[in-house]
Amino acid sequence: VFLGPASSVVFGDYMSGTNHVLPTGGQARRQSGLSVTDFVRFSSYQELSAAAAARLAEATACLAEAEGLPAHAAAARAWLGGEAEAPEAVTRPDSDLGRALRKRPEYGELRLYEPGRRGCEIDLSDNTNLFGQAPAAARTLAEMGAAAMSRYPSVYADELKRAAAAYFGVAADCIATGCGSDDLIDSTIRAFCAPGDRVAYPDPTFSMIEPFARMNAAVPVRVRLADGFALDPDALVAAGGHISYVCRPNNPTGSLFAREAVEELAATAAGLVLIDEAYGDFCDEPLAAWAPQTDRVVVLRTLSKAFGLAGLRVGLAIGPPDLIAEIEKSRGPYKVGVAAAAAASAALREDAAWVAATAAEAAAVRERLRGELDALGLRTWPSAANFVLVAAPGADADGCARDMLAAGVGVRPFPGLAQAGDCLRVTVGPWPLMERFLAAVGELVPS
Ligand code: PMP
């Protein structure tokens, strides 16, 4: 039984399973005993979306051709690349749907986010600012009256956009805001990818890009980083992403991809280039101000890291106004609350010097920490962010993270990381915290 405009005999034959009696090669003469299945009447239902038909078209056509059925092959290929418009969907009365609740098929592979954070004395697992929080944001929250709570915030956080525009030196219509930069990754994929489109990204990188692609029915495509965790723009372009995602500095490696490599990517990629600068305040050459001068680059920033405001959930997208407008359409209204918008605006206006000072302090601690880890015989990788990637003692990331948690120190394990093997990612913070970390990790180094 074929349901809906995209479901058809050709997909039924080659994908759902046959409804014909196939030749049995003479088997039927020897083995024709009855079984219970002979007394059961089965009905198969097939229901394809237009996007699913497009995905299955080539494989289906290949099977049809192998059977010498060119018309079947042509029927399948008619769905390729969305060339064939889906016919008007036939509306079926509710009773035809049955009672089985349908879930999105892509969601079968999705799991709830588990950052691995456990309550512990010293949490070095999430790259937040362990030196404190932007002081103007704290003042604004302390002074905020209860009356502010009862009204909706600005629909698209206009004041926050103006403060961010001044901070980055761009026009306010080059900025979109969101409930953390996660929200803007999600909105950007939704705005620029139709179901079945590709999101290409280097591996290893920020673990959330893959689930965000899947949540939006896009296809995640991983591309290996070149040696030394360097960006290979040609390889990324070859992956044909409707979006190419690049995290710079990269989480969890800490590497800062060369600006020229990102520029080459922007010059040659067919789709949108999304540069995640969650750790951009820690590096020397952020690209936020450059994005609006391009025709396809959007840079994401967050106030969760260097600004020390992760609990407020404020993210920013910076890019050409026509692209920013599309992101806002898919993001939806009222995503930044009154308190978050006011505190973040104050921080962007008044706390640039505080952010720069804590970023410099983090960089100094980071290099000192790498020196100490080196002395313990543990390999680290150069980092331009507020964390360090370190080879797990005994090459057992999960075991090390568990043992360190028992000692009151939380770190993020990365088992089997491409190019690096089992690693731990450690957030940089005031030196006494680093000493606790060094003591805990030192216990695990085989003597
Ligand atoms: N991008 C990267 C690279 C991150 O590491 C994180 C936080 N772990 C995010 C985005 C999300 O940050 P936010 O709190 O702004 O949603």
Image (cartoon, rainbow, N blue to C red):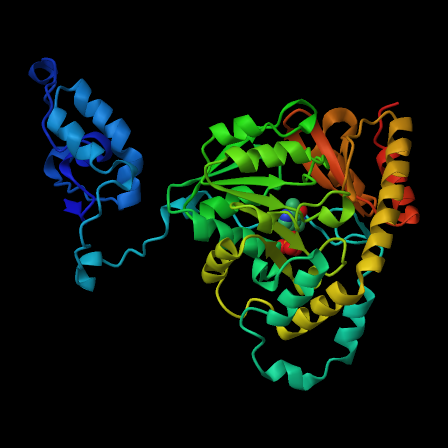
Q: Is residue 418 above or below residue 315?
A: above
**Residue 391, picture quadrant:** top right
Q: Residue at x 57, y 52 (%)?
A: 319
Q: Residue at x 70, y 35 (%)?
A: 253
Q: Quadrant of the C terminus?
A: top right
Does the image show residue 303?
no
Q: Residue at x 62, y 51 (%)?
A: 300
Residue 29 rendering spot, x and y as whole percentages: 6, 15
Q: Residue at x 66, y 61 (%)?
A: 165
Q: Quadrant of the N terminus?
A: top left
Q: Nearer the viewer, residue 421 or 240?
A: 240
**Residue 286, picture quadrant:** top right
Residue 60 rendering spot, x and y as whole percentages: 23, 29
Q: Is residue 183 left or right of residue 88?
A: right
Question: How many labels, in total?
Answer: 0
Residue 192 rendering spot, x and y as whole percentages: 44, 49
Q: Is residue 19 above or below residue 181?
A: above
Residue 233 rendering spot, x and y as whole percentages: 57, 30
Q: Nearer the viewer, residue 33 or 110?
A: 110
Q: Is residue 150 above or below residue 383?
A: below
Q: Nearer the viewer, residue 265 or 390?
A: 265
Does the image show residue 413?
yes
